[in-house]
Image (cartoon, helix red, strand yellow):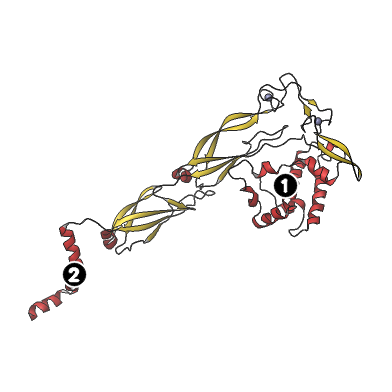
Amino acid sequence: MAEKRDYYDVLGIKKGASESEIKKAYRQMAKKYHPDNNPDDKSAEEKMKEVNQAYEILSDSEKRSSYDQFGHAAFEQGGAGGGGYYGGGMDFDMGDIFNMFGFGGSGSTARRNGPQRGSDIGVTIQISFEEAIFGTTKEISINITDKCDTCNGTGAKTGTHAETCKRCNGTGQERVVQQSIFGAMTSVRTCSVCGGTGKIIKDPCPTCRGKGRVKKAKKFEVNIPKGIDHGQTIRLSGKGEAGINGGGYGDLMVTVYVQPDRYFVRKGMDIYCDVPITFVQATLGDEITIKTIDGEQKYTVKPGTQPETVATMRGVGVPNLRNNAQRGNQVVTFKVKIPTELTGRQKEILKEFYNPNVVENEKKGFWDKMKEKLED
Ligand SMILES: [Zn+2]
Ligand SMILES: [Zn+2]
């Protein structure tokens, strides 16, 4: 996906530009890239779209301040879980803007019936803890608005075609003159005959009933990259809803839900787990095996390991989403288990261990003991 350009750059203004400067810059840009001045120029159409998006954000003080704070990210996450993602929601009507600013006076500039990109669709998929770490491929089935195959999206019955609306000459808009206390006022509204499509379908396609789009059950394969985390979204370009009047497809936004694991807890690229050891192992040290996502690994518990001691096993954590060679760590907390059932012999030994006299005696060296014997 192409990097989104900075909105201030798009309008060719400075960050601190005033409202009127933004408006002025927008008018200039809109004139430059206006479809009437650039017939059949795709790049101008794209530029115009970009300019519209930039203006939509920067002309609204609330949206502008969140853009200043968070950049494009401020709007990209907004519609999670629903359909209303950035791209789809922002495509607003050229007709509205040009009428708002009063240029492009003739009806032909009002393009209500222009191509409209399909909406972005948001879906959630569930994957396991391991799948998030090692990556996987998942198939998803969704019901989605797609182009009607019977009429190839035209909405007209096979063998017929849509006619240009006579009322609006295909513009989708009509001018209405109203008398008011200020005199005659002309306003523009959606064409009452064609409903803004600019077309009249006499024989509608029976499959889509003239809409050109139908709901379809579709399957998509989603490649889940290594290292993806809970709540992250994968964008499948062009797999969203079909557009209107020849507009492109929207995107499919797949948000990943990672099921929790019974043993491991993930925090970013690191994996946390508790490892139980006996109090004897903690005291004397031991060679143990610890479960990692790569399998079991040998680990040496040091003598005198205290309860809740934390150890880091390097390089067996989660791979970096962007650079799989880079991996996080596994952070282990040793849980020292105190025995609850002891034999009589075990109890005796432990009591002996805690008897200060015995301990003192053990500490004395051989010669001390010999001396004591001789003194007796
Ligand atoms: Zn159809
Ligand atoms: Zn019409």
Q: Amino acid at mark 2?
A: Asn
**Label ID, residue 284:** none
The residue pinned by badge 2 equals 355
Asked if residue 315 lies left or right of residue 237, the reply is: left
Quarter residue 371 falls in: bottom left
Asked if residue 362 lies left or right of residue 267, the reply is: left
* Residue at x 53%, y 49% (from the top left corner): 323
* Residue at x 66%, y 33% (from the top left corner): 242
Label 2 environment density (alpha carbons within 10 Å; few <14, some 14–19, many ≥20): few
- Against 156, residue 184 (above or below) is below
Q: Quadrant of the C terminus?
A: bottom left
The alpha-carbon separation of the residues under discs 1 and 2 comes to: 80 Å
Quarter residue 210 falls in: top right
Compare residues 28 and 297 and report the one nearer the observer: 28
Compare residues 73 and 184 and report the one nearer the observer: 184
Q: Position of residue 259 (x, y in %)?
A: 46, 44
Residue 363 visible: yes
Precedes in sequence: disc 1 or disc 2: 1
Q: Amino acid at mark 1?
A: Gln
**Label ID, residue 53:** 1
Q: Residue furthest front?
A: 181
- Against 16, residue 108 (above or below) is above
Disc 2 is placed on an element classified as loop
Label 1 environment density (alpha carbons within 10 Å; few <14, some 14–19, many ≥20): some
Q: Position of residue 258 (x, y in %)?
A: 48, 45
Q: Quadrant of the N terminus?
A: top right
